[in-house]
Image (tube, rainbow, N blue to C red):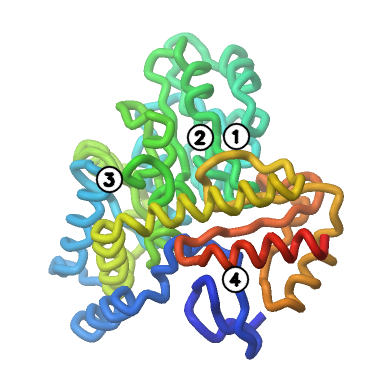
Amino acid sequence: MSMESPLGPRMRINGREVDYFCGTSYYCLHGHPEVIDAACAATRQLGMGPGTLAQMSVYLDLQEQLSAWFGVEHVVSVMSGYSSPMALLQGLRDDFDVVFVDAATHYSARDALGTLSKPIFSFRHLDSESLADALARHVGARQRPLVVTDGVFPSSGALAPLNDYRRAMAPYEGASLAIDDSHGVGTLGSSGRGSLQHAGLEADGNFLAGTLSKAFGASGGIVPGTCALAEKISANAMVMRGASPMTPGAAGAAAAALRILRSNPEMRENLARNVRHMRGGLRSLGFDVADTPVPIVSVRGEVDFDRLRERLDAKDIVVKVVKPSGYSDAPDVPSMRLAVFSEHSPEQIDRLLSSISELA
């Protein structure tokens, strides 16, 4: 498909105007005029590349906006969301001895784990009993375990059972939890701080890495936390020494997007409303859809989803079909992955639902 307009609920693809239910631009900020203007202004003033010795004001502004959003002392920023788990896990390398990872955790965390020179054990996807068993078998005397998982899994939209994981970790002194929350930050929690806030686990020993490229409408990776965590990342994470920061334009765009979200709380309210509308409508059609606030909705059932996708496309509605994969949290049968945006109108969602009812 050839995209000919910014990401949004209604966009131009292959010369056609279509309803778009794919991707991750949950507030459609990637195409927001103020975000684009901020990216252009920062680029015109400061160029494409980051500074070396001199600090650019655009990064200080982004730091202020991020710290306010997450309610923390400091937020480490890196070039990409893919590299943020590496910054976090390498930064924490002296705080744990053995790693336990959900079998479907994203590549970004898995690539990072390979750099740690620590024992790594896998447990079954979303299975706290499997985690408890792995901990019992593999944590030695005085060893500190680290549990690694996605907060929200990108193909299925499944929420990791973080409280169940924490209960399984309770017998182990110094146990830490680290999540890749790229799809949770901005969308989950009472103030949009992500899966840890949603689970009531914003506390010492629980850490997240995230991205600015999804809900926050820009690009770059983030690790919110304390100044002490930032110092550990600076000291231990090779990605901080070997990679450039995000571009000034990306930093300017992200800061503008955060301002927009903070000053327009109705955007988060609209997203929550639309997620409820979509999930409830699909359940009324007979699909077994989880009742969560995640804006990724996985639709499964005795349906030829490839054929359904083609028939929806003919009605100018674009959706994604997820196939089984050796990696990932993708189900073992084809499914339809729907992305819900705050800017989808109720009429668009109703049109999708009625079309699925007609064509499935």
Report which residue position mark 1 lands on.
Answer: 102
Q: Quadrant of the C terminus?
A: bottom right
Camera-nearest residue between 140 and 259: 259
Q: Which mark, by number, is residue 148?
A: 2
N-term mark: 2 or 3: 3
Name the residue type under label 4: Tyr
Marks 3 and 4, the one that precedes in the sequence: 4
Note whether residue 256 is visible: yes
| 10 Å crowding of disc 4: few (<14), some (14-19), many (20+) | many
Query: Mark number for residue 70?
Result: 3
Residue under pointer 4: 20
Residue 85 pos. (x, y %): 44, 46
SS of the residue under disc 1: strand
- Circle 2 packing at 10 Å, graded few (<14), some (14-19), many (20+), is many
Of residue 317 and residue 144, the one placed in the foreground of this image is 317
Distance between mark 2 and mark 3 Cα atoms: 21 Å
Q: Give the quarter of the image for residue 124.
A: top right
Callouts 3 and 1 close, C-beta under 8 Å: no
Quarter holding the N terminus?
bottom right
Give the Cα separation between the discs numbered 3 and 1: 25 Å
Whether 60 is drawn above or below 230: the answer is below
- The residue located at (57%, 84%) in the rendering is 12
Amino acid type indicated by mark 1: Asp
Badge 1 vs badge 2, beta-carbon distance below 8 Å: yes
> What's the amino acid at mark 2?
Val
The mark lying in front, picked from 4 and 1, is 4
